[in-house]
Image: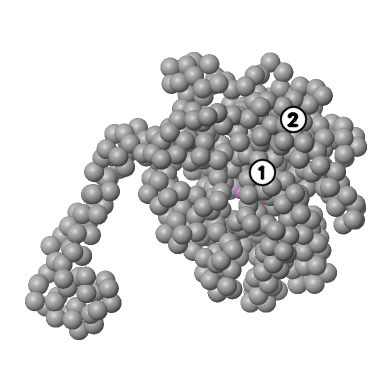
């Protein structure tokens, strides 16, 4: 079975001289080849392609021009130069499908206005989206590439400076609803498997001018309306919330996995939502990626991943391509142990560095990210199959096998029962946590 999509070129070739990226194995010294990612290779019970469901992020990869808060664009991508928005959108889509299919990546993800620029009115935006999604339908059919998720950009336009669903002005909330409705239509039309909410402006810059309770109530109401609408249109996919603590807002309501889970529970949204965990968002929240993955997975809510990485020397969302195999092993151990992603996949929400200015750099970046995940998956599977890792961890809790401990864990003892036991048994012996021994396991299997 081959999971590889057909290479689909448009009227012109945007990445000339680059063919389909082959798997060549770890001995290869060809920079445009996979060393570890082999789509059809079975690892545990699934192929690599099934474990990961890799996706390309339309915004960074085809819209990212290298601007930063201090500097102008550094890249003049040939698909971004046409004057007319429809033509530009078409070129961009041709470049996108050429790239995605040459990479052999099975999915992509977009915000509504990554596909085409927003129009001057809601009606014109809807018309533009209709046209470009017609074209996307053709491209998907010709290539076999699928839409992992769609979302609405509710953060770039100035009207959202005080929030979208949480805006204190009802007119803006209604505008956001109109936009989400069309983004849902586009996602459904293209067979999107999931739909994401990331609330970059759903939060505050100052608590002094903010009625937090009202804003959270509105956010929940808004999400309920979106779910109701999508279900009425026949959407059976999964909804995701993507936690992030801050940036661009000072404080974002979807702070981290634990906060989002509490919110979903409080507002009765758990039936429809799972989490999309992003590496660099986890670290911004002062957590490790592994921590966020663990929190979501333990709640049965690990839906999808936005793959990237931060920089250890600064605190921003630098969205670099992932390359740290050791850390990915830690995350993939959790994924394998808990049954993987629920509905989602691994979306490279990652951007080239500002001085990576050649189109070929997009290939190096994605090859590196996919190889890092693939290698980490092999190591994680090896650890679970051949090492005593799980047994060692279980052993730390072995004392809970005793009758008294079981009574405690199953809710059959009182505080007095525990104190009686403690008095009878004296001071606990110190027991090593063996952290270094656990850490060595990963290096041993790398
Ligand atoms: C920004 C987010 C954003 C979401 C989609 O930091 O990662 O890109 O993934 O809106
Ligand atoms: Ni992000
Ligand atoms: Ni993201």
Residue 82 pos. (x, y %)? 87, 32
Is 125 left or right of 280, judged from the image as shown?
right
The local secondary structure at tag 2 comes to helix
Residue 368 pos. (x, y %)? 53, 30
Residue 250: mark in rendering: none
Is 144 left or right of 335, judged from the image as shown?
right
Q: In the rendered view, would you say 129 is above or below 73? A: below
Residue name at image x 63 percent, y 34 percent: 352
The local secondary structure at tag 1 comes to strand
Q: Which mark is in front, 1 or 2?
A: 1
- Asked whether residue 346 is in view, the answer is yes
Ligand 1 within 8 Å of disc 1? The answer is no
- Asked whether residue 75 is in view, the answer is no
Q: Quadrant of residue 394?
A: bottom left
Residue 147: mark in rendering: 1
Residue name at image x 63 percent, y 45 percent: 148
Crowd tier of the residue under label 2, counting other residues whose Cα lies within 10 Å: few below 14, some 14–19, many 20 or above: many
Residue 220 pos. (x, y %)? 65, 70
Out of 12 and 366, give the one closest to the viewer.
12
Is 407 left or right of 356, judged from the image as shown?
left
Out of 436 and 48, give the one closest to the viewer.
48
What colouring does the structure picture have?
Answer: one colour
Q: In the rendered view, would you say 68 is above or below 154? A: above
Residue 95: mark in rendering: 2
| Numbered disc total | 2
Residue 408 pos. (x, y %)? 24, 74
Q: CA distance from mark 1 to mark 2?
A: 16 Å
Out of 22 and 29, give the one closest to the viewer.
22
């Amino acid at each position: 079975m081959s999971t590889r999509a057909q290479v689909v070129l448009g009227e012109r070739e945007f990445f000339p001289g680059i063919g389909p990226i082959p798997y060549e194995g770890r001995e290869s010294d060809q920079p445009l080849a996979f060393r570890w990612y082999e789509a059809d290779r079975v690892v545990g019970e699934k192929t690599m392609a099934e474990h990961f469901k890799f996706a390309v992020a339309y915004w960074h990869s085809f819209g990212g021009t290298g601007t930063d808060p201090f500097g102008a664009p550094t890249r003049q991508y040939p698909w971004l130069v046409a004057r007319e928005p429809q033509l530009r959108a078409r070129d961009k889509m041709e470049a996108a499908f050429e790239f995605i299919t040459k990479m052999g990546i099975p999915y992509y993800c977009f915000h509504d206005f990554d596909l085409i620029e927003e129009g001057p009115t809601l009606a014109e935006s809807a018309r533009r989206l209709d046209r470009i999604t017609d074209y996307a339908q053709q491209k998907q059919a010709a290539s076999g590439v699928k839409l992992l998720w769609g979302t609405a950009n509710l953060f770039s336009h100035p009207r959202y400076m005080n929030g979208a669903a949480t805006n204190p002005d009802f007119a803006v909330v209604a505008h956001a609803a109109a936009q989400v409705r069309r983004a849902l239509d586009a996602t459904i039309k293209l067979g999107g498997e999931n739909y994401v909410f990331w609330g970059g402006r759903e939060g505050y810059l100052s608590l002094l001018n903010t009625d937090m309770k009202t804003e959270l109530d509105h956010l929940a109401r808004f999400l309920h309306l979106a779910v109701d609408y999508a279900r009425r249109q026949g959407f059976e996919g999964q909804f995701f919330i993507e936690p992030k603590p801050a940036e661009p807002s000072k404080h974002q309501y979807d702070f981290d996995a634990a906060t989002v889970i509490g919110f979903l529970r409080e507002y009765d949204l758990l039936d429809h939502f799972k989490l999309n965990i992003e590496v660099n968002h986890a670290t911004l929240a002062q957590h490790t990626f592994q921590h966020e993955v663990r929190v979501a997975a333990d709640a049965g809510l690990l839906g999808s991943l936005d793959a990237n990485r931060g920089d250890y020397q600064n605190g921003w969302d630098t969205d670099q391509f992932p390359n740290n195999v050791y850390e990915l092993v830690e995350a993939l151990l959790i994924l394998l142990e808990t049954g993987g992603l629920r509905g989602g996949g691994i979306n490279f929400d990652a951007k080239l560095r500002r001085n990576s200015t050649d189109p070929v750099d997009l290939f190096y970046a994605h090859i590196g990210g996919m190889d890092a995940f693939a290698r980490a998956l092999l190591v994680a599977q090896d650890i679970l199959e051949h090492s005593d890792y799980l047994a060692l961890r279980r052993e730390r809790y072995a004392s809970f096998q005793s009758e008294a401990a079981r009574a405690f864990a199953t809710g059959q003892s009182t505080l007095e029962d525990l104190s009686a036991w403690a008095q009878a048994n004296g001071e606990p012996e110190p027991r090593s946590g063996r952290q270094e021994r656990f850490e060595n396991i990963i290096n041993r299997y790398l």
